[in-house]
């Protein structure tokens, strides 16, 4: 019996229960990052929205100055999401060098929609890869880019990830 | 904060007035009465925005408009495929034949683009008039994709400003609820304060 756990925008969830399926629905420019430890059979999934916590507005209005407050939702940014996901797994005894990593999403769904520096999907993909490298994690298996949305599922008991899109159906990556 | 809330409620009222204008025009075009069935306006947690239109995996035809000027933001008009087809048929029965192969996606998207133009222009013009501000929309793009993917991508700007955003959500139905569309109006929170001097 599967137990789906929805990982919403800017959330990170982890599980050690074999029946759990961590699901990030409808990733557009967002990137889903999954880590799974084959020894503990534990997994974590982050639903990343933006590339870097350093670009966020301070005081919530973009006009503040001074030291930025702590990030309330670590899953929102690639740098803090990957760090938080690693912390979740290492806290229960996982070893970063042995985990399997997957990522999906980072599409350019809305033509012409960009942040300063490029389209958000591409920026998110690169930022996640940079963060994975900083933490010494293996290269990810990935289904990223393009112009279509994806739903990503991590099957915790099996250590496998599927990606669904409207135009391409479901596949394992 | 109270002042900001007041400004947002005025935005919403203006947007609804704009939709009312569009309602009259579309009712005349289609020969069917258009009704507003759901309207709400609030600050919404970002994680909830992809769920505004129901299941995030449901495919929708979206008309997406960004606007700038005195206020920045986005306006999305979402059509379920079956509603899009019905609306297209009502808009142009003479070109939209009864056979499946006469209902090309390109034709449907073109007609949906027209509906979106009518609704989008009416809403944005009414907001601009109501506040005495300038709003400059870019031409809409039509996207056929999961509703959640479109809405979450559109949320990226709002994500830079905080963990919640202001959303005005409206739904219109036509022809005894056999066809409907949703309007999601997302003025950018951080850019709204600049309008206050024009609203005195």
Image (tube, coloured by chain):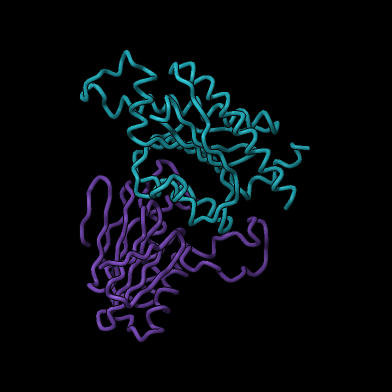
Displayed quadrant of residue A134 = bottom left
**Number of marks in picture:** 0
Task: Identify the image quadrant of the N terminus of chain A.
Answer: bottom left
Q: Give the side of residue A33 with respect to residue B67, left or right.
A: left
A14 versus B81 height, above or below? below
* B178 on left or right of A50: left
**Image height of B170 relative to A86, above or below:** above
Considering every residue shown, the one lying at the far right of the view is B200
Residue A120 position within the rendered picture, expressed as x and y whole percent measured from the top left: 43, 53
Q: Colour of chain A?
A: purple
- Residue B66 visible in the displayed image: no
Closer to us: B51 or A146:
B51
Query: What is the x, y in percent for residue B137?
Result: 54, 33
- Relative to the observer, which residue lies in front, A81 or B12? B12
Q: Residue furthest top?
A: B94
Quadrant of image for the C terminus of chain A: bottom left
Compared with A7, B22 (above or below) is: above
Residue displayed at 38% across by 49% down: B55
Q: Position of residue B39 (x, y in %)?
A: 56, 39
Residue A152 visible in the picture: yes
- Could you say where residue A54 lies in the image, as x and y percent from the top left? 54, 65
> Based on the displayed image, in which of its 4 quarters is residue A9 positioned?
bottom left
Quarter-of-image position of residue B68: top right
Question: Residue drawn at (44%, 74%), measured in percent from left and top?
Answer: A83
Residue under the point 59% across and 41% down: B72
State which chain is coloured cyan. Answer: B
Q: Residue at x 33, y 33 (%)?
A: B82
* Extreme-bottom residue of the structure: A93
Between B132 and B46, the one lying in front of the other is B46
């Amino acid at each position: 019996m599967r137990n789906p756990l929805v990982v919403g925008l800017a959330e990170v969830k982890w599980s050690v229960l074999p029946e759990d399926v961590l699901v990030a629905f409808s990733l557009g420019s967002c990137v889903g990052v999954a880590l799974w430890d084959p020894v503990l059979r534990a997994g974590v999934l982050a639903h990343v929205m933006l590339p870097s916590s350093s670009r966020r507005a301070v005081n919530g209005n973009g006009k503040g100055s001074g030291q930025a407050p702590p990030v309330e939702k670590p899953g929102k940014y690639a740098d803090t999401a990957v760090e938080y996901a690693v912390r979740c797994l290492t806290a229960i005894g996982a070893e970063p060098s042995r985990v399997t990593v997957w990522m999906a999403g980072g599409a350019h769904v809305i033509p012409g929609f960009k942040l300063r520096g490029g389209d958000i999907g591409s920026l998110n993909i690169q930022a996640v890869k940079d963060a994975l490298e900083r933490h010494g994690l293996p290269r990810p298996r990935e289904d990223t880019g393009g112009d279509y949305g994806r739903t990503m599922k991590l099957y915790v008991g099996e250590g496998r990830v599927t990606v669904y899109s409207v135009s391409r159906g479901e596949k394992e990556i | 904060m109270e002042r900001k809330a007041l400004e947002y409620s005025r935005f919403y009222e203006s947007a609804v007035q704009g939709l009312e204008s569009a309602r009259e025009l579309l009712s005349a075009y289609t020969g069917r009465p258009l009704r507003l069935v759901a309207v709400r306006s609030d600050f919404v947690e970002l994680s909830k925005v992809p769920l505004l239109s129901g299941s995030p995996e449901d495919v929708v035809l979206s008309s997406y408009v960004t606007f700038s000027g005195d206020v920045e933001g986005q306006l999305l008009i979402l059509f379920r495929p079956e509603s899009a087809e019905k609306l297209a048929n009502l808009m142009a029965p003479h070109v939209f034949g009864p056979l499946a192969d006469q209902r090309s996606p390109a034709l449907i998207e073109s007609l949906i683009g027209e509906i979106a133009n009518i609704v989008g222009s009416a809403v944005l013009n009414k907001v601009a008039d109501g506040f005495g501000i300038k709003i400059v929309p870019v031409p809409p793009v039509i996207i056929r994709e999961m509703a959640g993917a479109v809405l979450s991508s559109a949320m990226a700007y709002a994500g830079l400003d905080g963990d919640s955003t202001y959303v005005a959500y409206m739904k219109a139905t036509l022809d005894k609820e056999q066809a409907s569309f949703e309007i999601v109006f997302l003025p950018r929170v951080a850019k709204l304060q600049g309008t206050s001097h024009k609203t005195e």
